[in-house]
Amino acid sequence: MNDQKPAAPVMGGSGFLRIRLDLAYDGGPFSGWAVQPARRTVQGTLEQALELLIRRPIRVTVAGRTDAGVHARGQVVHLDLSRDEWLGLNRGAELDPAVALLRRLRGALSRGLGELSGAIEVHRASVAPVGFDARFSALWRRYSYRIADGPALWDPLGRASTLWHKHPLDVGLLNEGASQLLGLQDFRSYCKPREGSTTIRELQRFEFARGSDGVIVATVQADAFCHNMVRSLVGSALSVGAGLEPPGWLLERLLARQRDAKSVLAAPHPLVFEEVAYPSDSGLLARAELTRALRQ
């Protein structure tokens, strides 16, 4: 991205430009993504910073909501601005509005966060293609989860983003159990259902690998996730990896389609929203319409 003044942007039918923001955040200081009264949240902080710049209330749409304490490295949101609001971001300077928005937004976020400055970083701003929706156009989301299974692996410098598990875990057992959950399934047993929403999701990846540092990293990817789904999947898998339950137990729980006393959520702080994928520009609108129909 350069500092040259761009050509005039193409307007949508509504007269507004859809702006895409790519961002990352440390979820530790926040009560999750979504706005909550009297609580510091990522969405609330971002919207307050945008309101300071645009001088009106701004609402953003996110690719994937995250729970309290959960981090993000590859989060995406969109917002809608008028042509005048977009072009006015550079305050008359010969500067790309996207560059101006990044610079000014970084300052507004720093002002709003105070001592927590840097907990939210917007890395990219751009005019989104026609039909883009940060949530409904997404093809899939990917999370990671770090687990240090034993005191010898407990690194104090990484404690804010790694689970310290007291007992050794068998990666082979973890993967044997996790592989049985792949595909289009009803994950009611592994989520907290929301009224009016489906719990059917396509789990595309659920796997564990031990890195060169000895830490186990879980990768969980799906077309979308229900509330608490990733933490529930990992929390249940830990019982299998520790030898407390057989690998087939994860599938048994899935088929039962109910939450019970054995439904355990893994701690939120090692969970990171890593990436969200979208189709080519020509397929954005069709994907959004299809997703809306499926979710309803």
Image: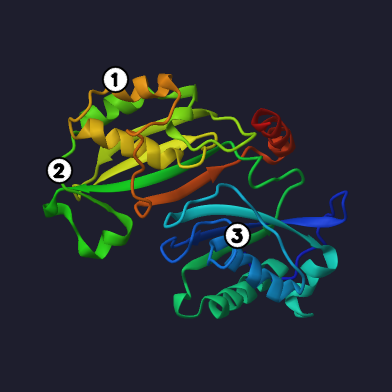
Question: Could you tell whether 132 is left or right of 24 in the image?
Answer: right
Residue drawn at point x = 69 percent, y = 76 percent:
52
Name the secondary structure under disc 2. Answer: loop
Compared with 147, 40 (above or below) is below
Query: Looking at numbered disc 3 in the image, what kind of residue is underneath it?
Result: Val
Q: Which residue is mark 1?
A: 248
Compared with 256, 106 (above or below) is below
Which residue is at the front of the view, 216 or 98? 216
Query: Looking at numbered disc 2 in the image, what kind of residue is underneath it?
Result: His
Residue drawn at point x = 55 percent, y = 47 percent:
64
Q: Which residue is mark 3?
A: 35
Q: Quadrant of residue 254?
A: top left
Query: Looking at numbered disc 1 in the image, what kind of residue is underneath it?
Result: Gly
Q: Are marks 1 and 2 in contact (CB under 8 Å)?
A: no
Residue 117, x across and y down, in percent? 48, 76
Quadrant that contains the C terminus: top right
